[in-house]
Amino acid sequence: MKVLFAVILLFGGVFSSALQAQSLGWQAFAQVKSETKFFKNEGVYVVTPKFDEKIKSLEGMYFSLRGYYIPTEVHSDKWIVMSKVPMSQCFFCGGAGPESIAMINFKGKAPKFKTDQIITVRGKLRLNDSNLDELNFILDDSELVAGPNK
């Protein structure tokens, strides 16, 4: 009986941590500090995230994000950009910070959305502080959980 109780506590703790990571979403991204780095190959200074151990420990966990679809000039069949806030307020157009946008890499073909459609996706968190072709917060192997196409 004691062994069964210990196993339940152990798996309960693991399950609780996984659920906590899923619900963190935008809140976790907002805690990340930034710094300015010089990218020699591009010859530019760029504000980049400074990932601490707390956020690094969440990398590889599955997150759910609810937000707004933001169209981009670069079109892809596999990924989209979503924002915590509507396009008029987002990082690209309105002045929100880089913590308010995420790149969503779908398992298959990315669904089609209209600007500012509210969607919920779930995917595995990957952090990026060095590849200027990607955003800082990326959800890989993502699936649409809720939205107009679901």
Image (tube, grey):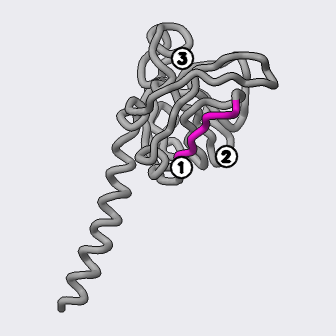
Which residue corresponds to the image point at 51% horizontal and 49% vertical from the top-left? 59
Query: Please, is residue 117 above or below residue 14 in the view?
Result: above
Q: Earlier in the sequence, mark 2 or mark 3?
A: 2
Mark sitting on residue 66: none
For badge 2, the amino acid type reads Gly
Residue beneath disc 3: 115
For badge 3, the amino acid type reads Thr
- What range of the chain is rendered magenta? 124-131
Q: Quadrant of the rendered structure where residue 127 is?
A: top right
Mark sitting on residue 108: 2
Depth order, front residue of 45/63: 45
Instruction: Decide: few, some or many residues near mark 3? Use Cα within 10 Å; few <14, some 14-19, many ≥20.
Output: some
Query: Please, is residue 54 above or below residue 120 in the view?
Result: below
Residue beneath disc 1: 124
Residue 5 relative to residue 86: left or right: left
Which residue corresponds to the image point at 47% horizontal and 19% vertical from the top-left? 97
Query: Please, is residue 97 above or below residue 109 in the view?
Result: above
In front: mark 2 or mark 1? 1
- Magenta highlight on residue 100: no
